[in-house]
Image (spheres, grey):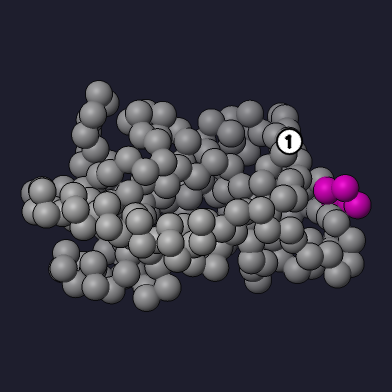
Amino acid sequence: MSQEQLVNIVTKIVMEKMQQDDDILIPIGVSNRHIHLSREDLDFLFGPGYELTKIKDLKQPGQFAAQEVVTIQGPKGSLEKVRILGPLRNETQIEVSLTDGFKLGVKAPIRESGKLEGTPGIKIIGPKGSVETSKGTIAALRHIHMDPQTAQKLDLKDKDIVDVEVKGERKGILGNVLVRVSDKYVLEMHVDTDEANACCLKNGDLVKISRK
């Protein structure tokens, strides 16, 4: 199934749910630990000129999971088989959960993607070498990717902060959710594994913005 077909199916499901509920329901995407690499660091880890091997398109257009994995090592421990996500970025960014941080011995601050100043570094080990980063380890701030049409319907704009209502056995409100708006985005809320486990959420579950 192509990425375009997947997007169309998800959009159809969301629209059907909207008709039933009068609310825009947002699909959940659970983000396990992963890493985004710069060109320079990829060369150190896998060899000069190495190219990532795409194994799966992610829901957000242009993003993909690569076949390649690395080990990340902190002062107290390490995590193996950490998936690389593409495409390459200007700066290397390592995204872990707070639980992962305890195992590594790294206090990863909760940050918006790309906001790396003052974040801790970590050792990344690949098949051809290793890299000691000076920064870049974060626990990603929960956020919603949203297209401009949906944002307009919800009276929201890029960088707004909202609360999200979770139904089910562990229903509750997730606060401080960042809204990211772009015509390059598909509607989806990203949470990490700690947040998903706390609320019994899995990929494809639907949540909605809480209106106070």
- Residue 158 magenta-drawn? no
- Image check: 53 left or right of 6? right
Q: Amino acid at mark 1?
A: Glu
Residue at image coords 53%, 31%: 99
Relative height, residue 30 to residue 19 (above, below): above
Apparent side of residue 139 relative to residue 159 in the rendered image (left or right):
right
**Residue to which mark 1 is pinned:** 80
> Which residue sits furthest top?
169
Query: Predominant secondary structure in magenta?
Result: loop
SS at badge 1: strand
Res. 45 image quadrant: bottom right
Residue 50 sits in quarter: bottom right
Q: Which residues are magenta?
A: 126-130
Q: Is residue 17 above or below residue 49?
A: above
In the shown orientation, is residue 134 left or right of residue 173? right
Tell me where residue 113 appears, x and y as whole percent.
Answer: 50, 59
Depth order, front residue of 35/9: 9
* Residue drawn 10% across the image and 48% down it: 21
* Residue at 40% in and 67% down: 185
Residue 17 spot, x, y in % from top left: 18, 49
Task: Where is residue 160? Give x, y as percent.
Answer: 27, 64
Which residue sits at x=21%, y=42%? 165
Q: Is residue 158 left or right of residue 48?
A: left
Going by the picture, which residue comes out furthest to the front? 1
Judge whether 77 appears above or below 108 on screen.
Answer: above
Q: Is residue 36 above or below residue 88?
A: above
Q: Is residue 94 visible?
A: no
Counting other residues with Cα less than 10 Å from the Cα at mark 1, is it few (<14), some (14-19), or many (20 or more)?
few
x and y percentages locating residue 72 in the rendered image: 73, 42
Marks counted in the figure total 1
Q: Say whether residue 32 is visible.
A: yes
